[in-house]
Image (cartoon, rainbow, N blue to C red):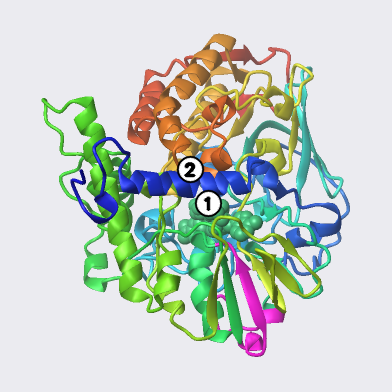
Amino acid sequence: MHIHSGVFARSLDEEPEWKRRYREEREKRLHARPEGSEQYRPIKGTISHYLDDPWKGIDEHVREPFHFDATVIIVGGGFAGQLMARNLLDQGIADFRIIEKGADFGGTWYYNRYPGAQCDTESYIYMPMLDLVEYIPTEKYAHGPELFQHARNIGEKLGLYEKTLFRTELKEIHWQQDSGLYTLKTDHGHRIRAQFVIGAAGSLHRPKLPDLPGLESFAGHSFHSSRWDYSYTGGDVSGNLARLQDKRVAIVGTGATAVQIVPHLADWAKKLYVVQRTPSSVGIRANRPTDQEWAKTLAGQWQKPRMVNFNTLLSGGRVSEDLVQDGWTRLRQALLPRKTADTTPEQLAEMRDAADLALMEGGRRRVDEVVKDKATAEALKPWYKTLCKRPCFHDEYLPAFNRPNVHLVDTQGLGVDHLTERGFVVKAKEYEVDCIVFATGFERATTWSHRAGVQVYGSNGKTFSEACKGGMETFQGWTSRGFPNFFIMSAQQSFFTPNNPHASTVQAEHLAYVIKECSKRGIRSVQPTAQAQQEWVDMIVQSSKLRMAFQAECTPGYYNNEGKVNDRIAKDSWYGGRSSDLIAQFEAWKEDGQLKGLELTPNRSSSKSRHDMSRI
Ligand code: NDP
């Protein structure tokens, strides 16, 4: 007996039709790529050019290796590194340097200059330190150049240009027990000593490529989305890719990056193939210029409460007013079950399923409303739960498929099979193209050291990679036993919010507080006690379990380690409860003032080194 129709259809003894469809889509993907994250190939050797920085330019300075000491070294000049710098300055700690491999600040927004690059989170909460630079973004969702310029403005305002080694890659850091300092090695042969090293290298920044047979044999042009080659395409980040007018172009991938790029390629390429493995859900963007009258009402410390308001909602909490009112907050509120004291766990699960289904059905209807060709529309519909994959928001992506030059290559979960000299092959059919853009994302499942390109040698002879080979081992996500004074800014074993700079804001305050306390208390080094670290890791793993159960039913992607949900990803994960609760816990830990869970090594009284923390 059927109790509903359409995707709701179910017979009493069967799983609902939508669940079956979600499961089948997931199994199709798992079957196609049983190797999980191993399907991606590290970019090195014959394909290392995919990492080349198109923006680096020529270094005009003579770069003799030099030596210097600093109290703090920050690895990475993106928003996280800049927030760290600001908080150090706020604490009166000016003896720091930033090491940045790019030629300027910006991190994500330095590298990702692909056409259409845009902030997916409201710019009034995403662009950090608006108070510092006294700036109001021009749009609700700012575009790449504005975000990049913002990072440059922060650099100017804080005097960070004088404190940063650009075009420099930190390679190794070695803890020296005797001196209580790290020695650092860069790719330029600099020798640096520092008391604290802070890894602010970003979480999704090391491009990844699928391990496709024939990758080297393709004779056309190709590049990764984060290394856009405008010398080939023409134009700039605003589009105008005029040199593609006589070109057949393929874009591989349909994630948040490709969704922003496709409309621009569609505008200019003679022929565009959008190669899809799993469709994204693409909600309404509704970008708009900043209302200047509203902007005039913003006074004082307005940004942080707005960030907190957004994060409370995104954490599953309730607020009296949704200040941001966008796709993210509407989505999260739609998923919040209206439970009562009598609601049973089974009813709660059903309510959650119903809310999720309604949301995804709405997204699938949007595809039907916009995309004219029925087969293409059908192929563009996502079949998984809302938060299984990164939700996207865009108003020009779906309409691009109505253009005669745009062809969706629906690989039905299989992905590209291989490349040839002339193009790419899907299901035994070869597509000849002049150019392939890999919008295939960034490493997530690899170790911190691999992603950051920095190996850390700690106090116990181990590297950080070895210490974390079974998953992260930290206290509060930022400090790890055996690696004194090496701190990390990351979501792993910490908290996650789609508004990444908010997380960095909290973490930077936290770390600057710890460093300042070390200075005040005459502490030479800190690391977690074995017990505190173990308890923290256990708490993270335990709290991740709910999400792991959810992720195990999701279609593969970087959110769920390409479908391999195991103990390691529970450890590498972030706190499974509300991020707002964990932020509150961090605040309480600071207020308590005891530096609980940390093992503190005092300064040697005889030490007259400039690294005596009383000097900072
Ligand atoms: P993703 O990892 O999200 O997407 C990679 C895409 O490549 C997926 O569609 C994937 O398919 C596809 N793919 C991988 N291998 C193959 C293959 N062999 N054949 C065909 N397709 C393949 O990377 P993105 O760069 O799109 O986004 C990464 C993250 O960056 C986002 O999740 C978001 O957090 C962030 N971002 C933020 C933006 C912002 O404005 N703030 C804008 C853009 C990105 P499948 O899904 O099947 O694995």
Q: Amino acid at mark 2?
A: Ser
Q: Give the quadrant of the N terminus.
A: top left
Q: Which residues are magenta?
A: 231-253
Q: Quadrant of residue 348?
A: top left
Tell whether 533 sits left or right of 222. Answer: left
Residue matched to label 2: 504
The answer to whether the residue labelled 1 contacts the one labelled 2, judged by CB atoms less than 8 Å apart, is: yes
> In the picture shown, does residue 560 fall above or below 161?
above
422 and 21: which is toward the camera: 21
Tell whether 287 sits left or right of 509. Answer: left
Question: At 45% from the left edge and 19% from the top edge, which residue is drawn?
Answer: 539
Q: Which mark is residue 79?
A: 1
Q: Is mark 1 within 8 Å of ligand 1?
A: no
CA gap between label 1 and label 2 equals 8 Å
> Would you say residue 247 sits in the magenta stretch?
yes
Secondary structure of residue under mark 2:
helix
Residue 75 in view here:
yes
